Image (cartoon, rainbow, N blue to C red):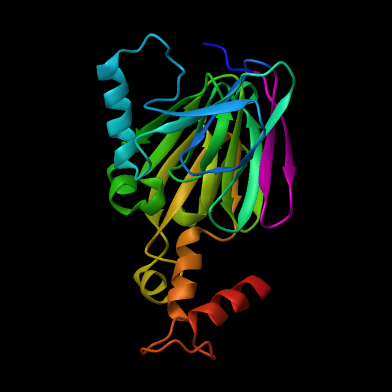
Amino acid sequence: MSSHVVDYKIFGDDLQFVEVELDPRETVIAEAGAMMYVEDGITFEAKMGDGSQPGAGLLGKLGGAAKRAITGESLFMTHFTNQGQEKKHVAFAAAYPGKIIAIDLDEANGELLCQKDSFLCAALGTNVSIAFNKRLGAGLFGGEGFILQRLRGDGMVFIHAGGTIVEKRLAGETLRVDTGCIVAFESTINYDIQRSGNMKSMLFGGEGLFLATLQGTGRVWLQSLPFSRLADRILANAPKSGGRTQGEGSLIKGVTDLLQS
C-alpha cells in the first residue's frame, strides 16, 4: 500500500509540534494521546493497527497489537481522516521537550529503525512494527536500543527526541554512541553493543558500561538529551523529605533549573 502524501509544518524551537495538512480523504496515523488540535471536518478513530495492510484479519491485528504492547506503547493507534471537501489541519506534540524531525521513508530505502518511544505520527500506509536486536550483547546491554521500532513505507514519518537532534552521515565509518542517545538509523547501518573501555573506564568514567556501535553507510540521528537522563536529573533534584515546599531542593525548581540550563 502506497502511503498518503501529506504536507506539514513544524512549529517552535525546543518545545515543537507538527501541523499536518490533509487533503480530502487523506489520513495520518499517530500514537495515542499525541494529538494537539484538530480542525472541523477531520474525524479520528482509535484502531488496532496502522492500517498499512487493509486486508489483515483479526489475528494479524492482534499480533501487531501484542508486539506494540511489548514496547510499552498503546495497543491502538489513532487514525485522523479529512472527511471534508477542503484542506484541513491536525497537529501533534510530544510529551517532553525536544525536537521533531520529518523523514521521507522513500529517501531512506523504505525502512527506518528508531528507538521505541520516538515515533510520533506518519502518513497512512506506513507500517509500524518492532525489531528485536538479534545480537546477544545488544539484547542484554542495549538499554533503549534493545527493542527498536521499524518503520516501513514510502511516505513521511515524524520522529521526536529530547534536546537537540543531529544527523550524521556515515560512509563505511564507525560511530560509538551512548545507547540512550540513538534516535534512529537507516537499515543499512549495523548496530551492536561494545564495552566502553577498560575496567577502570567502565567503573569510573561515568559513560556507562557499554556503548552502542553504529557502522556502515547511511544516516544516523542522535539526541542530546535522552528522556532517561531528564528523568534522572529531575529525580535527583526532588525533595529528599516530605512537605510541599518549592525551595532549593524542590521538584519544581529542579525542572526550572534544567530547562534554563
- Front residue of 136/83: it is 83
Q: Position of residue 37 (x, y in %)?
A: 63, 42
Quadrant of image for the C terminus: bottom right
* Direction left: furthest residue: 59
Instruction: Name the foreground residue: 192 vs 153.
Output: 153
Q: Residue at x 36, y 27 (%)?
A: 48
Location of residue 189 in the rendering, given as x and y in whole percent from the top left corner: 51, 35
Q: Nearer the viewer, residue 30 or 155?
A: 30
Residue at image location 35% in from the left, 12% down from the top: 56
Does the magenta segment cover residue 49?
Answer: no
Q: Position of residue 182 (x, y in %)?
A: 51, 49
Examine the rendered structure and indicate whether residue 63 appears above or below residue 15: above
**Residue 147's quadrant in the figure?**
top left
Residue 17 lies in the magenta-colored region: yes
Q: Does 258 sit left or right of 56 as displayed?
A: right
| First to last magenta residue range | 5-23
Left/right of residue 99 with respect to residue 196 in the rendered view: right
* Residue that protrudes farthest toward the front in the picture: 40
Near-viewer residue (220 or 252): 252
In the image, residue 204 sits, relative to residue 173, either above or below, namely below
User: Residue, x 47% and y 55% (percent of image)?
Assistant: 180
Residue 86 position in % (x across, y down): 74, 19
Q: Inspect this view and state whether residue 151 appears.
A: yes
Residue at 39 percent of width and 49 percent of height:
193
Question: Which of the 4 image quadrants contains residue 83?
Answer: top right
Residue 53 lies, with reference to residue 29, above or below; the image says above
